[in-house]
Amino acid sequence: MRNLWAQTGNYRTNYQQDTTIFASYREVVSLAVLLLGLLALPQFLSRSNVYVLDLILVYGIAVLGLNITTGYAGLINIGQAAFMGVGAYTAALLAPNLPFLLAIPLGGLVAAGVGAVVGIPSLRVKHLYLALATLAFQEIFVWTVGHAPLLKQGGAVEVPTGSFLGYAVGFRNHYHFWYYVILVFLVILAVAWRNLLRTRYGRALIAVRDNDRAADAMGMDPGRTKLMAFALGAFYAGIAGGIYAYLARAVVIEDFMLASSVKFLAMAIVGGLGTLVGSFLGPAFMQLLDLNMETLSNFIRSLGFNTSGVDIASALKPLTFGLVIVLFLMFEPRGLYNWWRLIRSYFRTWPFKY
């Protein structure tokens, strides 16, 4: 009989067991404890720290979508920030007339439609050429927004303060309120992400990534699978963009430039491509690293280097950013998720070493 409280190996004997979300009751309890901790966490943080936590969760949603497109389908996407921008501008335009519970999903749907169109080149090109196609979309998006009077030519498009059941969100509790909203969206999307990859469609993504010709020979449709991957990845980015629009209370084009797309790709690599946990570890690591640039610059000044007239923190950002990506690709290509996997494996068999 299988021990549903402890897991010492893979004893799955049928397809139903192979498609279960949780392998043991211990994982269910651990997830419940994690959610309770996340619910209580904002009560012990300052307003500015809650905002940082909000950004990590929003970026986590965008990276989840990128892990569908790139992590599982193997389609290089350098335009995730543009999809996020589509969702953000859609939500900003709908916000004065619709509640945020409708505006945000609609932003995701519009982004999914755009993603399906952008994914059309994937039917003919691969690898570097596909990356250039998504890069072209990123630049087209920036140019279009910068010349659209409706979107104030890239200037700030204000978003009204959200309200829930007649309760207007005030300035002091703005970040706390949106933290719980983001958490609800995140849990729903993460469960949907996990369930998708347990279905035949998720297995088709992996098959097309490994060998699209072999997948075609086995009865799968590589073209439809690739379009689905782009649409789903863009949907997640659109949801993240809609939430970000309400969180920032304004949408500006500077938040969705090429640098942001590269940043999302770096988060996926650092966290671990194609992993659920890595989709949150990557954004958390990169965001906290970004916040500690000032501490690093102060450390450099303490060593006696002459930095008069130079903003060391701004100069170190691109250097540290690129160095982190190179180091992870060289020494830990599976990202922070691999560290999490090793720690979890250790405690799963503790106190034994086997």
Image: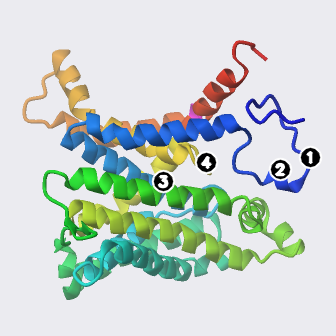
Q: Position of residue 342 (x, y in %)?
A: 65, 27
Tell me which corner region of the image, top left, top right, bottom left or bottom right, holds residue 167: bottom left
Distance between mark 4 and mark 2 Cα atoms: 20 Å
Crowd class of label 3 (few under 14; some 14 to 19; many from 20; radius 10 Å): many
State which mark lies toward you, 1 or 4: 1
State which mark lies toward you, 4 or 2: 2
**Disc sitting over residue 275 in the figure:** 4
Of callouts 1 and 3, the N-terminal one: 1
Distance between mark 1 and mark 4 Cα atoms: 24 Å
Q: Which residues are magenta?
A: 329-333
State which mark lies toward you, 4 or 3: 4
Crowd class of label 2 (few under 14; some 14 to 19; many from 20; radius 10 Å): few
Distance between mark 1 and mark 3 Cα atoms: 37 Å
The residue that disc 1 covers is 13
The residue that disc 2 covers is 17
The residue that disc 3 covers is 265
Left or right: 16 with respect to 302? right
Residue drawn at (72%, 38%) of the image: 24
In front: 87, or 325? Answer: 87
Residue drawn at (70%, 45%) of the image: 22
Distance between mark 3 and mark 2 Cα atoms: 33 Å
Q: Are discs 2 and 1 less than 8 Å apart at CB?
A: yes
Q: Is residue 331 magenta?
A: yes
Q: Are discs 4 and 3 less than 8 Å apart at CB?
A: no
Q: Position of residue 174 (x, y in %)?
A: 20, 55
How many numbered marks have been drawn onto this rendered protein structure? 4
**Disc sitting over residue 246 in the figure:** none
What colouring does the structure picture have?
A: rainbow
Above or below, comparing residue 35 to residue 263 in the picture: above
